[in-house]
Image: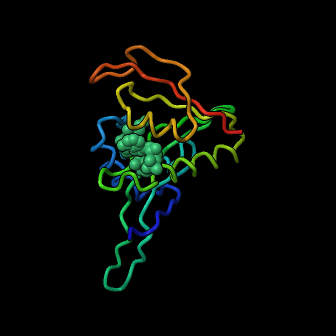
Amino acid sequence: MESPITIRRLERADAASIVAIQSSCPELAQWSQHDYEAMAAGNPIGWVARRSVNATVADPNPSPIIGFITARIAADEMEILNLAVTSDKRRLGAASALLQAAMAWGIANEARRAFLEVRASNLVAIRFYSKAGFNQVGRRANYYTSPPEDALQLAAEIR
Ligand SMILES: CC(C)(COP(=O)(O)OP(=O)(O)OC[C@H]1O[C@@H](n2cnc3c(N)ncnc32)[C@H](O)[C@@H]1OP(=O)(O)O)[C@@H](O)C(=O)NCCC(=O)NCCS
């Protein structure tokens, strides 16, 4: 049986692992390691997901990061900036747990609405966000480059 997923706030030392996951996901905005190191300090903010395997004397390495989410708040709106789970750990609820952590932070910080942009071809992410209660509220033509593509704007009321 897979061990449970634990979520904690992103720390500076997580930045290299996050960039490694991010660079394997062409769907994502590509932020730098420095960007993620800075997120350990606040807004934007991030969380990471790990399998909760206890470190032992025989294996002192903590369990690796399997996913991350980043978000920021402006006024009463929370924007999801990036979200990914490593490909061999998908469909185990990691992204749902990460989104839940971000939503709880948004609610605690007076956000009323969560929103994000996603590539129109990213049907997996669109299904994921739809299940999480997000609806399409707009479309931005040719929002993305490399390759050029429309963005769907998704939003959910969170209060
Ligand atoms: C989108 C992504 C973050 C989902 O991560 P995940 O950990 O697999 O998601 P979860 O296990 O929490 O899935 C929750 C629900 O989302 C939906 N979902 C997730 N992946 C799906 C897929 N491949 N096909 C259909 N529905 C899917 C399902 O309803 C799922 O519930 P279920 O497994 O009980 O059916 C992951 O596929 C990913 O990292 N994709 C590449 C990066 C990306 O596109 N990020 C979003 C950019 S905005």
Q: Residue at x 68, y 38 (%)?
A: 111
- Which residue is outermost to the top? 141
Taking the image as drawn, is residue 36 in sight?
no
Q: Residue at x 45, y 16 (%)?
A: 140
Q: Is 2 placed above or below 145 here?
A: below
Q: Position of residue 10 (x, y in %)?
A: 48, 55
Image quarter of residue 127: top left
Q: Tell me the quadrant of the picture where the N terminus can be found.
A: bottom left
Q: Is 47 placed above or below 107 here?
A: below
Residue 102 appears left or right of 49? right
Q: Residue at x 44, y 40 (%)?
A: 82
Q: Nearer the viewer, residue 71 or 157?
A: 157
Count up the numbered dots. 0
Q: Is 83 placed above or below 62 here?
A: above
Taking the image as drawn, is residue 23 in sight?
yes
Q: Position of residue 12 (x, y in %)?
A: 44, 56
Residue 30 appears left or right of 47? left
Q: Give the image quadrant in which the ligand numbered 1 is located.
A: top left
* Colour convention of the picture: rainbow
Q: Position of residue 76 (x, y in %)?
A: 69, 33
